[in-house]
Amino acid sequence: MKTTATRQTVIQAIDNVNKEQDYQIELNRDDKTGKWYNFTLKSKSGIPGARMSSTGRNLPCASWHAHGYVFDAIFEIEPDAIIVSLGEKITKDKGNWQDKSIGASQTMSCTSIL
């Protein structure tokens, strides 16, 4: 995903969420292209803040809930930021917490380890 927020804002948002939710989220992708800061999130598998595959296997990826909390924290620090995730433009007033289907009867939120 990419954002107009600064790298420092994203790192602070991750730190805030880790403290508030007792997660262990980290940056995976971490680079800048033009005006966009590109990042992806990861987590150790099988712990709160991580996700499972649609078949129930633990993944070393940040969950849908973890992403939502980080996006909210970014907007608290930089209210005018724009985030583009899964091809969707997310702003403070539009787009966060939109669940996505990942199978016939499963959504991204169902795979979060809470």
Image: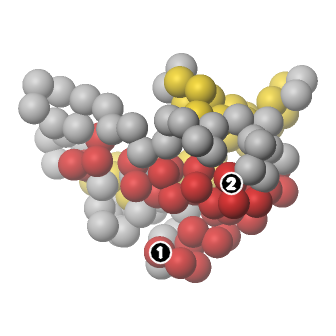
Identify the residue at the far right of this view: 34
Q: Amino acid at mark 2?
A: Ile
Secondary structure under the numbered disc 1 in the rendered image: helix
Residue 21: assigned label: 1
The residue pinned by badge 2 equals: 74
Hey, which residue is sitting farthest top in the picture? 87
Q: Nearer the viewer, mark 1 or mark 2?
A: 2
**In the image, residue 97 lies at what x, y percent?**
42, 45
Determine if residue 82 is in view: yes
x and y percent of residue 6 in the render? 84, 47
Q: Is residue 60 visible?
A: no
Q: Position of residue 106 (x, y in %)?
A: 16, 36
Element under label 2? helix
Q: Tell me the kind of residue under disc 1.
A: Gln
Decide if residue 105 is on the left or right side of residue 21. Answer: left
Task: Please state which of residues 89 and 104 is positioned toward the viewer in this rendering.
Answer: 89
